[in-house]
Amino acid sequence: MKFGGLIFANLFRKKIRLMLTIGSFAVALFLFGVLAAVYEVFDVGPDLAVSDRLIVINRASIIQTLPVSFKERIEHLPGVKQVTFHRWFAGIYQDEKNFFPQYAIEVENRRQVFPEFVVPDGQWQVFAKDRQGAIVGAATAKRFGWKLGDRIPIRGTIFPGSWEFNLDGIYHGRHTEDDQSEFWFQWDYLNERLALQQRGQVDGIDLRIENRDDSVRIGKLIDAEFANSLAQTRTYTDKAIGASFVKQMGNVELLILSIGGVVFFTLLLVTGNTMAFAVRERTSEIAVLKAVGYSELFVLLLVLAESLVLAVVGGGLGLALAKLFTLRGDPTGGILPFFHLSPKAIFTGLAVALVVGAASGLLPAIFAMRLRVVDALRRV
């Protein structure tokens, strides 16, 4: 019998045990895939942040506003390329559970400052002329079944009242990881409906700079410009402010690594125990293989190969299920800006499965390799 035939004959000896072991790998790798997708939201997002983009917020707190007039002063500073601004809206669509980010934006320079968000020119032109126009990310449009021309009612929270918008455009991200959940509408539409004392305020001013190496210098220049104003500023790079949001949520990396470590350690024990039993059951057969001339190395590789086959089949199944799960989109109802299992995470998962498979089969394989024919036959 060939080497491959021996492997599969041994694996299918106990079909229920085979299914349970493969199932253990599948469950563990499915969990790994979901955790990896969640981790990438917090890790990849900041890494993708454009390093030549800065955001200016109120020095006192991110919930404090800045005068919109700061935009013009920033535009005239050396090294600044384009400037835009936004204001957080936080309205409710139908139900409080239907969360998605909503921003009142400045139309003129938005696309130049955020080139990763792609809106067809025709749709953007319609939006720019429509005071009640809105543009939404493809993920949110798909989530609610919105299409161009729909009338979207939103109930204000920070800005009370009923607000209605015309869906003039749908944007897509240039990268899979780009946030496609946001909802934009014109800042002018918001500003003109506010009380006089609330007008002319923004939550953040976003800008692109000529040279990304000048980000620190320009950030200090901006903050110095408003050092003596009633609304002092603090300027961050996109990456820095993204990392600060992750920090506020705690050590996500440690939590995910801890859960994953426990899962794989448990899998290692379960699979190792399974392989140990499988080898003990075949003591006499291993002795016969050695008696008819098969080498100790052959026996070692045979047992290791069985363990690796279990790891590859079960791990591949689990990662495939995890990929299918992520294709359904964000399962949290808008909390995660994107939910994607990258090829890198899939290859990492397969590598971890192979390591666990090899480690769990190593001791039983060594036991089988060192088994003396006389001792084995004596146990029969």
Image: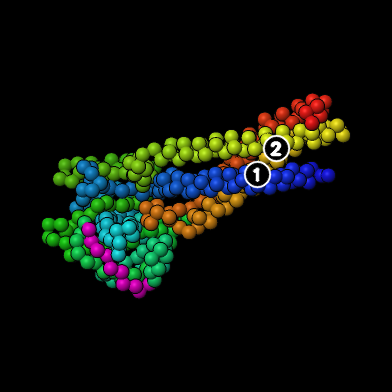
Magenta segment, which residues? Answer: 148-157
Q: Nearer the viewer, residue 290 or 175?
A: 290
Q: Nearer the viewer, residue 377 or 8?
A: 377
If the image is split into quadrants, where does the C terminus sit? top right
Quadrant housing residue 106: bottom left
Left or right of residue 232, residue 335 in this image: right
Q: Amino acid at mark 2?
A: Ala
If the image is split into quadrants, where does the N terminus sit? top right
Residue at 55% in and 53% down: 321
* Residue beneath disc 1: 17
Q: Are marks 2 and 1 in contact (CB under 8 Å)?
A: yes
Residue at 19% in and 61% down: 160
* Residue beneath disc 2: 278
Q: Main secondary structure of the magenta part?
A: strand
Query: Which numbered marker is on residue 2?
Result: none
Instruction: Give the alpha-carbon distance from disc 2 to disc 1, as whole Å.
Output: 10 Å
Q: Could you say where residue 291 lies in the image, as x and y percent from the top left?
A: 86, 31
**SS class, disc 1:** helix
- Residue 366 position (above or below residue 192): above
- Alpha-carbon neighbours of circle 1 within 10 Å: few (<14), some, or many (≥20)? some
User: Can residue 214 be seen in this snapshot?
Assistant: no
Taking the view exactly as shown, the residue that stands out farthest to the right is 292
Left or right of residue 199, residue 266 in this image: right
Verify whether residue 153 appears in magenta: yes
Query: Counting residues from the N terminus, which is met first, the one under dot 2 or under dot 1?
Result: 1
- Residue 156 position (above or below residue 29): below
Residue at 27% in and 52% down: 205
